[in-house]
Image (tube, coloured by chain):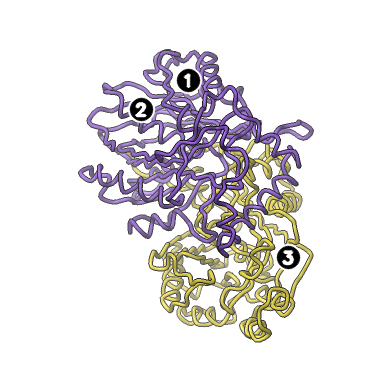
Chain colours: A yellow, B purple
Amino acid sequence: MCAPEQPPALALSGVAYCLPNKIVDAHAWAARCGQSARRAAALLDNGTRCFHDAAGKSPADLATQAVRTLLAATRVAPDSIDALIYTHTIQSSIIAPPAGTAHLIQSTTGLGGALAFSVAQQNCVSPFAAIRTLRALMAQNSAIVRAIVVCADLIGPGCDHLRAIQNLALHSDGACALLLERGGACNRIESLYLYTDGRFFLAMDDDIQPVPDDRYYWSAFTTMRAALRQAGVHADQITCVLPHHVNLPGWRRLMAMLGIAQSRLFTHNFARIGHVFGADPFINFQDSDEKVVGERSLLFSSGLAGCFGAMVVRH
Amino acid sequence: MSAAPDTDAPDACIVATASYIPVSRVPLIALFGHAPELLEQMADAREALMQSVYADTIHWRQTESPAGPADANDLATPPDASGILTVAVERELMLSDMALHVTRRLLATAGHHAAADTIDQIIVCQGSFEHDLTLSCACRLHCELGQGKAPFALGQLQGVSFVMALKVAAALMATDAQTRTVLIVAAERWRPPFQRTIGALTALGDGAAAVLVQTGAETGWSVRGLTVRTPAVSPGVERRLAWIDTATLTGVIDETCLQAGVSPAAIDWVLPAHLNRTLARDISAQCGLSSARTVLVDAGSTGYLCAADTPVNLDRLLHTIRPHPGQYILTWSAGFQGQAACALLQFRGGEHVRT
């Protein structure tokens, strides 16, 4: 048997995101879908203020805009992209079969040379799963040099009442595109760790809300700790933690568990944009000013069904 | 216009297979219009929620896809060249129920096989929806089996999904010493309002399959070659809602054989996509594949099983043959936006596990 091939060094060379223009605040959301003002107040208390509303746009439209913005910002030629991976949290964030969302994004953005497919069912950790898949494919095929992972999700009108996650977050519609390049030195991915905790599968109540479970903290903490170990770095070497926008009070607890100063948690976007599904840590990556060369950020996301993912990036 | 070249021959071996096709058959003529149970189901809040999200996806298709609002016309034409007379219809199980059922069937039969002891990775392929908004089939399998790293699904490739999953499985096994056994599970269950007919091209049936892939196995079907292409459509080119790119398809078959150094005429069994009988025969003829060795397993009765098509029919083929070491199976598949894939499998000897 052959020795395993080394995964290639992979860099997160660019990030662009697309958020719909329409912004709805927590009180307006509560009013429009029959929720109490008390619930809106509880959301505000937990750092959630508003969300972006796609208002009829499709996930493919949002993803296409994000990819176009990424290509323009990075000045990368579309025909130099060797792979396009579409990811989504909600299974219905695609256009109906037999049409193909990945194909549509590929064709409308001119990625004629890309291998286009989707990675899903890791919920809000799906972008991390896509990067893991891409890295394995790159190791086997030296022709794959440059790729885009794009995630897009939205809450349709019939699901508006499901936007809130307990009183801890409001789902926000949007898309985020990542440019990933083999061998890039800047923003190199030093580790990528995914963990699925089967104990949380179907941990939903009758209102399709996750059941509070204190074991969440331990699973989230151990996932981030594993990513740090895989990167060979200590917690105090992380200058910025780029979180998913769920449960800001819980993040204070996680930072204490990690032994990282609270000031290193990037909280700028919690209230500003809401929880954009799997896009949160990458939007934060783009918006963070802490990307000092040689220093490191820790990206984290978790999703329904006990999905957890963490990544260390060296700037 | 094509994807990055990839015809590597990874050290991956299919060591066990299982399939499940529901017994119920519905004639094509009965498929038009919505199923009668739909209105009763709408009374249920969760059913209403699912119908709401289904309606969103169809609305987006009508506004985003090249066929535009006329897409329903593209779908409703009854198949005339597909050779499909009835489709298999699952009436009880949800998609993930079918996936779990076929996986348990596989593991029960393959229990004595070393590969079945520890599953390191689960990959799911599906093109149809789970009838539960938040349920991940991959996570359900992971939870129920209690094995494997973070599971995930590969998609947006329809019939090509399984070969893509095989490709990713091989890549994961090649780059991670801890990943030696991968379980690929493909399942489809089509419900209203989604139509089962894809114009004159094909008609969709329900079914599921599970395939166990292992690295370094001494027995089973070794992956000797594998090619996947996903061509884009150039701006200004008019396309219908669904089409098959025969040029890309013949290209991936030729390339796979060439890379493996195997003449198409030397293939022992050709397993085409079971989406259209005329297409299957035409592709075999164009690629120099023997028509006598081209196997079409009962597609007229089950319909096209989309993401589950290749693994279901591979399992059914393996039930009927007694291969010798060195013999080849070539399988090809196609997506509805021109995606194309081909895999070349070579028998290593020993006993292949099948249910």
Q: How many marks?
A: 3
* Disc 2: which residue: B317
* Disc 1: which residue: B258
Q: Amino acid at mark 3?
A: Asp
Question: Label 1 marks which chain's residue?
Answer: B
* Disc 3: which residue: A53
Q: Amino acid at mark 2?
A: Leu
Cα distance between the residues tagged 1 and 3: 51 Å
Tags 2 and 3 touching, CB below 8 Å? no
Q: Which mark is residue B22?
A: none
Which quadrant would residue B246 be assigned to in this image?
Answer: top right
Q: Amino acid at mark 1?
A: Leu
N-terminal of the pair, mark 2 or mark 1, is 1
1 or 3: mark nearer the eye: 3
Q: Is residue B295 left or right of residue B110?
A: right
Q: Give residue A93's position: percent from left, percent from top.
A: 62, 54
The residue drawn where x is 54% and y is 39% is: B158
Question: Label 3 marks which chain's residue?
Answer: A
Q: Are discs 1 and 3 located on one and the same chain?
A: no
- Specify whether residue B119 is in view: yes
2 or 1: mark nearer the eye: 2
Q: Nearer the viewer, residue A31 or A239?
A: A31
